[in-house]
Amino acid sequence: MKTTLTRASLLMAACFFSSYGHAVDVNTGDYDALPSGTNLAMVYLQYSEANDYYQQGKRQDGYLRTEMSITRLIHYTDINGMLVDPQILLPYGSVRGASVNGQSLGNATGFGDPIVGATFWVVNQPQAGYVGRYVGITPLLTLPLGNYDRHKAINVGENRYKFDLQLGWVEPLYKQLSLELFQDSVFYGHNNDAGNGNQTLKQHPTYELQTNLRYDFSRTQKMAVGYALYTGGRQHLDGDYNQTKTASQQARIEYQQLFAGHFQVSTQLIHDFDVKSGYKKDTGLNLRLLYLF
């Protein structure tokens, strides 16, 4: 028997989507420190499709298709002997066909919330192993400047500040094999135009663990097999727990190729599993185009 969703349940799904991109995911090699004065211009093209929605571990029929692009600009510089890379991320995209148990949540297109931040390398040992040993700390601030309509269930912007403290560690293991570990702690401001448009959404911090086992075939080719764990993020709407939190795991595989020393193409496939809350991405494709100058 198909479950009929109440209006409150639809609002829960909408609130969960607003926080779906809870942390800034990392590509393999992102914490490899580059020389001071280097600039990177990147465009991310991301596609994902979900056919299931989960609430408290129970599967419901659902659908969600997202098509996002992100422009990212990075500059490496030296501050008092420490390598730092100020950066900005500008998202734009669309959400199509969002639904739960046949009830539509609508569509959305527009600019997402911009993100500003920088990585501070506290360990920078490029001579260690094949790729080097690095430890970086990256504070990232999300600004509520994206497209948001309080009368719509689905939005590209989130209408709230977010602060993501990301830690990254690259450790050489054996010859061209290395391990990458990343941890995110994300803290959320309040959205005072959530739910029916006049409610306040509050969210506990979310935590993400990302790891890659990486193999560099050469200085221009690398591949990584990765895993991500998302947890935390209990949400309250006008003070009431709305049965929504972050709880899922993800498998990844990625390949990168550098051309002519300046242009890199990265292709990553992702698949969600063990989802306890929110949409499950059955298929995801992330393409990144990078230009180094």
Image (spheres, rainbow, N blue to C red):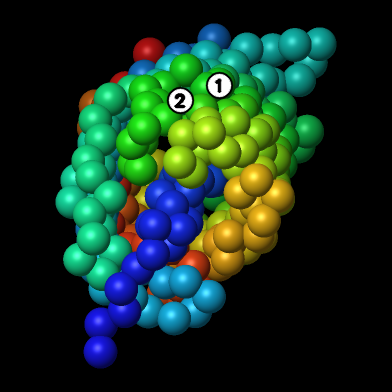
| Res 258 label | none
Category of crowding for the residue at label 2, using alpha-carbon neighbours closer than 10 angstroms: few (below 14), some (14–19), many (at least 20): many
Name the amino acid type tagged 1: Leu
Question: Which residue is found at the position 35% from the left and 68% from the top?
Answer: 5
Residue 44 in sight from this viewpoint: no
| Res 113 label | 2
Question: Which residue is found at the position 35% from the left and 43% from the top?
Answer: 153
Q: Is residue 188 above or below residue 159?
A: below
Name the amino acid type tagged 2: Asp
Q: Taking 166 as reference, is 40 left or right? A: left
| Res 143 label | 1
Considering the numbered disc 2 on the image, is that residue within a helix, a strand or a loop? loop
Q: Position of residue 144 (x, y in %)?
A: 52, 22
Q: Is residue 274 above or below residue 49?
A: below
Category of crowding for the residue at label 1, using alpha-carbon neighbours closer than 10 angstroms: few (below 14), some (14–19), many (at least 20): some
Question: Which residue is found at the position 23% from the left and 45% from the top?
Answer: 106
Q: Position of residue 290 (x, y in %)?
A: 32, 28
Q: Taking 291 as reference, is 196 left or right? A: right
Considering the numbered disc 1 on the image, is that residue within a helix, a strand or a loop? loop
Q: Is residue 112 above or below residue 278?
A: above
For the N terminus, the quadrant is bottom left
For the C terminus, the quadrant is top left
Residue 147 in sight from this viewpoint: yes
Which mark sits nearer the N-terminus, 1 or 2? 2
Residue 279 appears in which quarter of the rendering? bottom left
The residue closer to the viewer here, 220 or 191, is 191
Q: Are marks 1 and 2 in contact (CB under 8 Å)?
A: yes
Q: Taking 57 as reference, is 219 left or right? A: left
Q: Position of residue 277 (x, y in %)?
A: 49, 68
